[in-house]
């Protein structure tokens, strides 16, 4: 009987990778990319051997190709399994599933070992790929309010307050949407971002009348209306 590691390797090579290519992604084995001119939209398989079984999950990331080129980091493209700090967005597959929690599949020796691989393919088809397509499309058609350089001063203020930086600032339906790795349960982040929002609103820019803060999955955290 094959070991769990052997079955896992067979599953990725013979089932998962061909399924990813059938969905329109390129790559093999552990990393796959959704073709796009402006962004690296990636899915990576994270493996964790555990005794007589192999556990695995999926990491997703979106990184501007110009941002990656400017970063000076090694490699032709990012590895979605590595956190670099230049990503526009990243998440584990469990955050996109209805349970919104950690999701690890297990490959065990036995007749049903392939179920885990098939379930992971289904998660990509129904949740990961649609989210990547949505994010790529939003970046392609959305109007950017400030460039990466233009946000440098604001992010320096956030850094001094130990608050995660603004990753994107976009205009949507008369609202300035700020996106970053924040949490609704962080009162310091809310207070500092409220000050940032009031600063943006005080400029009197007629293109937006409110500031909305969202986490990296696009979930709304706080809304600060103009006065």
Image: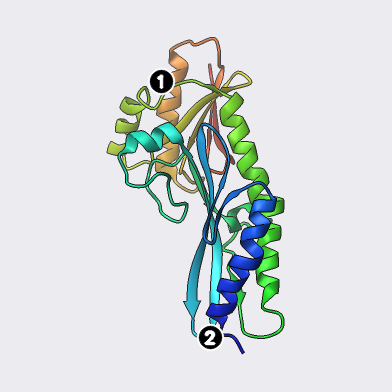
Kindly identify which numbered label has been placed on residue 52: 2
Q: To which quarter of the image does residue 106 belong?
A: bottom right
Q: Nearer the viewer, residue 189 or 58?
A: 58
Q: Residues within 10 Å of mark 1 (few under 14, many from 20)?
A: few
**Is 122 rendered above or below residue 52?**
above
Of helix, strand and loop, which one carries label 2? loop
Please give the name of the residue rendered at 46% of the width and 44% of the height, measured from the top-left corner.
181
**Is 127 rendered above or below residue 214?**
below
Please give the name of the residue rendered at 49% of the width and 46% of the height, measured from the top-left corner.
183
Is label 1 or label 2 in front? Answer: 2
* Structure colour scheme: rainbow
Q: To which quarter of the image does residue 162 belong?
A: top left
Please give the name of the residue rendered at 59% of the width and 66% of the height, measured from the top-left corner.
13
Spot occupied by residue 61 in the image (x, y as percentages of width and height) = 50, 47
Answer yes or no: is residue 158 visible: no
Judged left or right of residue 221, residue 84 is: left
Q: Nearer the viewer, residue 210 or 166?
A: 166
| Nearest to N terminus: mark 1 or mark 2 | 2
Q: Cα distance, mark 1 to mark 2?
A: 56 Å
Judged left or right of residue 154, residue 40 is: right
Q: How many labels were placed on the picture? A: 2
Q: Quick one: which residue is furthest to the bottom in this view?
A: 1
């Amino acid at each position: 009987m094959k070991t769990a590691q052997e079955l896992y390797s067979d599953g990725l090579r013979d089932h998962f990778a061909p399924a990813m290519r059938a969905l329109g992604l390129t790559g093999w084995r552990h990393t796959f990319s959704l073709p796009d001119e402006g962004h690296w939209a990636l899915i990576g398989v994270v493996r964790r051997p555990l005794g007589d079984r192999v556990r695995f999950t999926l990491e997703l990331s979106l990184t501007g190709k110009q941002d990656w080129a400017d970063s000076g980091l090694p490699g032709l493209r990012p590895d979605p399994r590595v956190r670099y700090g230049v990503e526009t967005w990243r998440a584990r597959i469990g955050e996109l599933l209805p349970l919104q929690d950690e999701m690890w599949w297990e490959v065990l020796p036995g007749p049903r070992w392939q179920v885990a691989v098939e379930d992971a393919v289904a998660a990509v088809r129904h949740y990961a790929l649609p989210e990547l397509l949505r994010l790529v499309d939003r970046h392609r058609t959305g109007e950017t309010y400030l460039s990466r350089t233009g946000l440098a001063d604001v992010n320096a203020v956030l850094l001094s307050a130990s608050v995660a930086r603004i990753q994107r600032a976009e205009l949507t339906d008369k609202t300035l949407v700020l996106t970053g790795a924040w949490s609704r349960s962080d009162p310091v982040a809310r207070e500092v971002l409220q000050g940032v929002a009031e600063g943006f609103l005080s400029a009197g820019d007629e293109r937006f009348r409110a500031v909305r803060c969202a986490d990296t999955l696009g979930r709304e955290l706080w809304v600060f209306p103009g006065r």
